[in-house]
Image (cartoon, grey):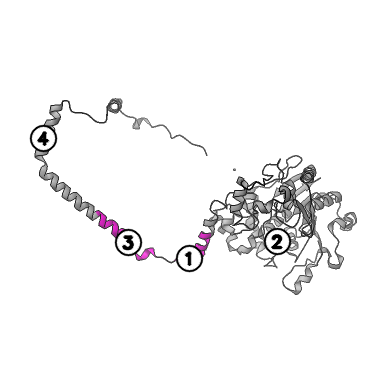
């Protein structure tokens, strides 16, 4: 998340003869060297060997010396000869891959070694899907993803989170999806692939159609947009009126997707007040990173398994973080993790908000109380795993030591290629930030 077995006993055909077994036992009790019976007998044997084999000794020594010289020459021949067939050309791609994997040796596959602070829930409820479900759906999603209208969604969702949003939405099959933060419309497109007949409400300061002037974007004809000049922030929408207008009465069939880089504690409280139960947060940043206060940061507490940190510069955590910081962009060392007065929670003691345009310093006590509140309303908490290990995707953005195990484990190159992940551009894998699905009440 190995047992030793004893071999089967020998059959009767392989059993030793009792007599020979006794002989072996007797021999084993005897000393390994046997002195002559008498000193005189020993002297006679020496004289006999000396007189009978003096000439043969000279011949044996000569042959032995000749053999040594021959052996030495043969070794030199093997050492310095290089057959032409050994100098096959090296594949540059394979060489780069080998170099990348060599750098990741001992670092890439140790998922969760620095702790994964998993938010505690009221009753410990878990998701109804399995790892097999994820793998099967992943293979189904790859050809869908290849038809996306926005091929280069830089600064937007990459492949991992696109799959996560599609998978969760398709599994829940909501009647209505509310999207806060649309950017160029890629996430709206993903939602439409998951639930072709569901209603979608999209809130975004800038309408996705504005991006069409500069390049690819997606505008859904059956989506209600609160965008551009009609934009209304999620927390200011009169949801009772809007839902009534859309004929929605059962709020348990509504899914809310947040990709707006706002304080997630604030959004959680707003959604709870409106009566929504199913939420997805796209950017669930790890402690010390990101532009807003996330659920993962909130649940990173010393009393939670995998949570809490030490600012001691010579601790095991500090040493490990310093090594990983050289390979993974989002891996922070102790100096970056810890702020004034050893404040490590949030981002160096600050709860960021609104794309980091707003910063509020919070005490450790306040951070603790935030966690207790979140636990009191959480029915379920599930972080999307990375789709594959970094030795396969060559991503460097997230640190595996702070992540759950991927869907396709490191080293499963055959599986990675078979389901089609190898056909994707490596740049699409560099956007994983622990997307999370939660149920609240």
Which residue is identified by label 2?
A: 157
3 or 2: tag closer to the N-terminus: 3
Where residue 431 appears, x then y in whole percent?
A: 67, 59
The stretch in magenta equals: 71-99
The reply to whether the magenta stretch includes residue 319 is no
Picture quarter containing residue 34? top left
4 or 2: tag closer to the N-terminus: 4
Element marked by disc 3: helix
4 or 3: tag closer to the N-terminus: 4
Element marked by disc 4: helix
Element marked by disc 2: loop
Badge 2: how crowded within 10 Å, few (<14), some, or many (20+)?
A: many
Which residue is identified by label 3?
A: 80
Q: Give the alpha-carbon distance from disc 3 to disc 2, as whole Å.
A: 55 Å
The residue located at (67%, 66%) in the rendering is: 147
Which residue is identified by label 1?
A: 91
Q: Is residue 184 above or below residue 388?
A: below
Closer to us: mark 4 or mark 1? 4
396 to the left or right of 75: right
Where residue 193 appears, x then y in whole percent?
A: 72, 61
**The C terminus, quarter of image:** top right
Which residue is identified by label 4?
A: 47
């Amino acid at each position: 998340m190995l047992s030793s077995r004893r071999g089967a006993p020998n059959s009767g055909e392989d059993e030793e003869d009792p007599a020979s077994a006794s002989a072996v036992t007797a021999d084993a009790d005897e000393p390994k060297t046997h002195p002559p019976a008498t000193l005189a007998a020993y002297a006679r044997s020496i004289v006999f060997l000396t007189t009978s084999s003096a000439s043969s000794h000279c011949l044996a020594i000569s042959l032995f010396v000749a053999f040594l010289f021959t052996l030495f020459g043969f070794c030199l021949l093997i050492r310095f000869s290089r057959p032409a067939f050994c100098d096959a050309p090296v594949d540059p791609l394979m060489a780069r891959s080998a170099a990348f994997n060599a750098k990741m040796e001992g670092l890439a596959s140790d998922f969760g070694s620095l702790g994964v602070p998993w938010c505690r829930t009221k009753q410990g409820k878990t998701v109804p899907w399995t790892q097999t479900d994820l793998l099967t759906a992943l293979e189904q999603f790859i050809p869908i993803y290849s038809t996306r209208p926005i091929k280069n969604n830089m600064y937007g969702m990459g492949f991992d989170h696109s799959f996560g949003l599609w998978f969760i939405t398709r599994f829940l099959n909501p009647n209505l999806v509310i999207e806060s933060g649309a950017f160029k419309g890629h996430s709206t497109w993903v939602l439409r692939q998951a639930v072709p007949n569901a209603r979608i409400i999209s809130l975004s300061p800038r309408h996705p159609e504005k991006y069409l002037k500069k390049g690819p974007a997606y505008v859904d004809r059956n989506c209600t947009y609160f965008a551009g000049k009609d934009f209304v922030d999620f927390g200011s929408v009169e949801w009772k009126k809007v839902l009534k207008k859309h004929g929605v009465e059962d709020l348990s069939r509504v899914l809310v997707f947040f990709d707006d880089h706002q304080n997630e504690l604030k959004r959680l409280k707003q959604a709870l007040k409106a009566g929504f139960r199913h939420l997805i947060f796209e950017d669930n940043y790890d402690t010390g990173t990101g532009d807003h206060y996330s659920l993962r940061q909130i649940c990173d507490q010393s009393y939670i398994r995998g949570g809490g940190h030490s600012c001691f510069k010579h601790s095991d955590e500090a040493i490990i973080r310093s090594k990983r910081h050289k390979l993974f962009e989002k891996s922070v060392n102790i100096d970056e993790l810890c702020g004034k007065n050893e404040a490590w929670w949030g981002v160096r003691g600050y709860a960021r908000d609104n794309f980091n345009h707003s910063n509020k310093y919070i005490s450790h006590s306040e951070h603790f109380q935030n966690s207790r509140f979140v636990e009191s309303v959480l029915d379920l908490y599930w972080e999307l795993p990375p789709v594959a290990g970094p030795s396969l995707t060559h991503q460097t953005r997230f640190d595996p030591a702070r992540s759950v195990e991927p869907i396709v484990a490191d080293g499963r190159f055959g599986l990675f290629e078979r389901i089609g992940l190898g056909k994707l551009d490596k740049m699409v894998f560099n956007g994983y930030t622990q997307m999370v699905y939660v149920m609240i009440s």
